[in-house]
Structure formats: C-alpha cells, structure tokens
Image (spheres, rainbow, N blue to C red):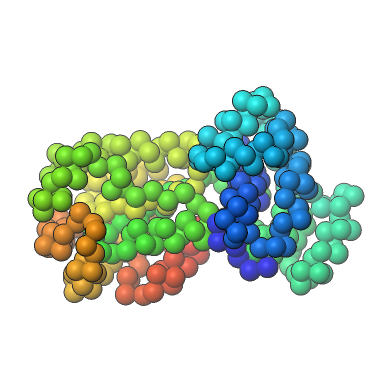
Amino acid sequence: MPFIPGLRSCYSLVGRLVYFGRMLDKIRLHADGRLPADYHANLGIGFDGRTCGFLGIGYESLKTRVLAGGCDEDILAWAQGQGGDRTDDQCYVWNRFMMKIGWRDDRTAILQDRIGTYGLTGKPIETFFDMNDFDEDRDPVAARSWELKESRVVLLMGVSGSGKTTIGRLLSQITGWRFTDADDFHPPANVAKMAAGIPLTDEDRAPWLAALRAHIDARLAAGDNTVIACSALKKAYREVLIADPGRVKLVYLRGSRELLHERLLQRTEHFMKPAMLDSQLAQLEPPANAFTVDIAQQPATIAALIRRTYMQC
C-alpha cells in the first residue's frame, strides 16, 4: 500500500497515547471517501477496538464525536471524560504493549504471513506497527519510531509569495500534521493596515509574535506535530518563536524577486499587496541556520524535501 495522505503512523502520539491519532485519521478519511478499501474491514476492531477498550469508550460513540469536529486533543479529552482518565503509568504500559504486538507472541505467525502477503519480506519488521509503517512507505527503523520522540514544529518562513501556505497545507495533507497560518494570529488592526498597503512596524508585530509563540508552546506541550507558515523576516522575530531549536525546525523558502512579484500579481484575494514586496525584502534577514529551499521547484518536490528532512514520523 503506498503512502496515504492524512494517515499518521501507528507510533504517532496524541497526548500520551500511540495509535489514537491514527484511529481518528481513519475515521475522518473514511467519512471523506479517501480511506482505501483495504482498511475498511478493520474499522472499529483490531487496534481500533483495543484502543477504545483501553479508554473505556465505544467506537461508534467515538466516531460520532470525531465527525462532529474538533482537534485531536479535544477528542482525547472527551474520551477521557467518558471513560475516565488514565495515569501516566497506565499509558506507558499500554503504549509498550501496543508497540510490541506481533513480537514473540500469539500474533507472530499472523504477522509473518502478512509480511509475505504485503510484499515486505526482507524488511526489518518485528511488530505490526513496523509492518504498517513499511507498508505505507515509512521507515520506522531509520526513524527509531519506538522511541516516541517529542512533538515537533516545522516553521516555514519567507516573504509573501514564497509559498508558505501552499507548502504548509500540502505537508499537512501528506503527513497528517496540523497546519497553522500565522496570518490568522494578526489582530484586526494589523490586517487593516496591511490591506491598506501600510507596512507593519515592530510594535505592530509584537502582540502577533506573542500570540504565535503561545500557540507554538501549546502545541508542543500537547504533543502535537505542527507545520506553521510565518514570514519571520527578522532574526529577532525568530528568536521569539524558536525557544527550543531541537523541537522547532526552521525552513526558509527562498526565491528571486521576479518570481515572488509574479506570484503576488496573481493573488487578488490576499491582503498582502505586490507593492509591499520590496518592503518585506528590505526587512528580510536571511537565517544562517535553516533548511533553505529554492521555491522555483514544484510544491510537491519542496514538500518531499521538507518531509524527508524533518517529518519522518
């Protein structure tokens, strides 16, 4: 089975739990008609059923709650409200149990049979989690997925027209990570100034940066992998946003003025006007320590580069 856009690895954490996010993805994708038919038979049973059993909730109730909307954390909080919260120790034992199913247990023979059926013979597969990852074009061994690494933020920076939102949404679709556009955090006064073609001052940007930093901290604390599109033109702005370089990874989308101007001319619905491009370029302080990508490449190519560098999960 090729990689399925929007379907997370079994190893991905939501809160303190593995697999829960994947189960939510399957529910959403199935409702959207985007879940491959091979996955339909196991909806609500197998790992889904085990996870619901651990949480003390029914799958149909969970499905109804997921389709009603809300982020993963809201749904997990709902589940804990229904079935009761679980201690850190309980979650730790549960995670280790789930991650080792198929390794020297009564499911080993079934696992070995499926490895052959899926054409994965020769892969370093020891568990069903491993098998699912390899089957969906991930490499859990190279990523050491069983270590359950802390959540991460990928911050896409660059001037307007560099493709931050396009690339961010594409990465979100491909990986299942949350996508946030920093423009959404501007107060109304900032939006009005930009719509009128008036460049923002550092004073204007201060509350915007503070709100965005609070959002980043909250996403990391919640264990949520996130892609953020933000101009982050100056070093001082990035210093506000990147408190932990180990968990907040900076990607600089770099392009020529000609290409950037051409793109902005094609955008009629956005408050950023082409005439403001030179102002942004004048403010831009290119980062010294960022993963830099040439925006002349196709969006899919750019997304693949970023995913391979920072988002193998």
Tell me if I can see residue 267 in this picture. Answer: yes
Tell me if I can see residue 96 in this picture. Answer: no
Across and down, in percent, residue 248 comes to 41, 48
Give the side of residue 230 with respect to residue 112, left or right: left
User: Looking at the figure, which quarter contains the C terminus?
Assistant: bottom right
Q: Quadrant of residue 116?
A: bottom right
Across and down, in percent, residue 104 comes to 86, 51
Quick one: 74 or 115, which is closer to the camera?
74
Question: In the rendered view, would you say 203 is above or below 307?
Answer: above
Q: Residue placed at 34% from the left, 53% from the top?
A: 229
Q: Residue placed at 48% from the left, 62% from the top?
A: 307
Quick one: 247 or 188, which is closer to the camera?
188
User: Looking at the figure, which quarter contains the N terminus?
Assistant: bottom right
Give the side of residue 292 with respect to residue 265, left or right: right
Q: Residue placed at 28% from the left, 48% from the top?
A: 183
Across and down, in percent, residue 60 comes to 69, 40
Across and down, in percent, residue 143 comes to 60, 58
Q: Quadrant of residue 59?
A: top right
Give the side of residue 197 with respect to residue 169, left or right: left
Q: Residue placed at 52% from the left, 41% from the top?
A: 69
Question: In the rendered view, would you say 216 is above or below 300?
Answer: above
| Number of numbered discs overlaid on the protein picture | 0
